[in-house]
Amino acid sequence: MPAINYSLTYQLAELANQAYSVAGYADPYFAAGVTNLDGTKTAYASRQAWLTAMNFTPIVNPAGSTDMMKYWGVMTTVGGVLIIAFRGTNSIADLKIDLGNWEVGLGTTYVELAPWTLTHGGVPTQVLAHHRFLDTYLAVQASVRQYVQTQLRGATPPSAIQVTGHSLGGALANLCALDLAAFLGATAPTPQLMTFGCPFVGDQAFATLLNALSPNSQRFELSWDPVTAHPNLGRPPGGPTDIPYVKAGVAVALTGPDWIQHFMAGYYWALKYGQPHGFNPGVDPATVITDLTLKVKTADSLGAGTDADISVTILGVNWGVLDLPWHNDFEQAAFDAYPLFTLFPAKAPTGKRIQDLTALTFAMTNVGYFDVYDYSWKLAYVDVWVNGQEVIHIPFDCWIGPGEESGSAATRSIGF
């Protein structure tokens, strides 16, 4: 599993989500409130007010005959980082772009590939790309290049370029990152690519060149997302040869329940609550920990509680048995808070930071005398609080104890 910069990932995921609002929505939509990934809404007087408030420049196809065909995403520069975010499928016309010249075989999908020649360092290289994805990107290429060149020529040029998108937007982001890397050359920041639920875009030559010109690209893929598995094969115009589609970048697999599937909100849910577990938006990983509290939820199901000794390990410290004074710990449906630095002052480390929270382990170290149902405990979830702020919500949803599938201990990984 590659390292995940959760702060950057949340930022790009939100912009990929916001990009959907650029096309097909009138002013009353913005007045009612644009839905953010966390479910909150922010109201704006009009679309132009939204663009101005967010410091967005639209990605434009000047030949687009409708609002939906004209606007394809947003561009902004924040904190020295130039970000290009493409929207995904939002109409029947967009779906036709996704499908292209679609054929279906036994367990296989075919979509026509088109040739595209890029020149980098004076050397031309031909690749093959999904013909409708390529046509769509080339229609907005001038809009993107103009914005990027204007920013790079400004008084304070950006030090980094990030390209992102969800679904169809992820496919366009692939094409954009490759185009900018070849077009800008070595004197500009190397475009970095991060996509969510992205389909296949091009052939082996496409993937190889993109990996070379935009290394360290990441594609987030939900285990239940069908879009990330298609198309499988392509055929150049007039050619019967089956050419495999190949993905560029490094896959970051996310897990979550099957209901979240492909939607951008599902990717946010998986980033926040799935495995690997990421820190909440806005959390600064460099924050020094002076107080650490675990809020532990025991499941509300028959026999979920326990009288056994439960110990915890976090920050690389085995803190020992969790036992609040004059309190019956880990009862069914209970939500108990354990301020570790207060309960175990001799074990409290100094100088540790939020980024040092890499794993959390709960273990049953001694079975309970009064556990008449069985010796197990069902842990629902844990909220980790640092310095009075919740930094991460970690679902466990498992039984812990002798003979259980998890065994007498359960660990969840944490990471940026």
Image: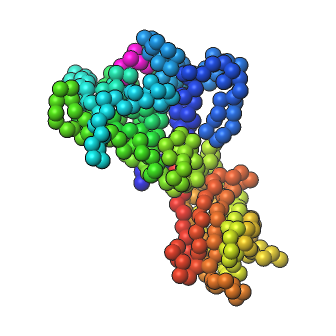
Q: Main secondary structure of the magenta part?
A: helix
Res. 251 visible in picture: yes
The residue under the point 83% across, 77% down is: 326
Q: Quadrant of residue 213?
A: top left
**Lateral position of residue 353 relative to residue 252, left or right:** right
Please, which residue is most extreme toward the bottom here?
369
Q: Position of residue 309 (x, y in %)?
A: 67, 80
The residue under the point 37% across, 32% down is: 99
Q: Nearer the viewer, residue 206 or 89?
A: 89
Looking at the rendering, in which quadrant would you find the N terminus? bottom left
**Lateral position of residue 215 relative to residue 379, left or right:** left
The residues colored magenta run 137-144
Q: Position of residue 93 (x, y in %)?
A: 44, 24
The residue under the point 53% across, 82% down is: 403
Q: Quadrant of residue 33?
A: top right
Q: Quadrant of residue 347?
A: bottom right
Q: Measured along the vertical axis of the image, is residue 64 above or below residue 414?
A: above
- Residue 150 within the magenta-colored segment of the rendering: no
Q: Measured along the vertical axis of the image, is residue 319 above or below residue 86?
A: below
**Lateral position of residue 411 relative to residue 229, left or right:** right
- Residue 138 within the magenta-colored segment of the rendering: yes
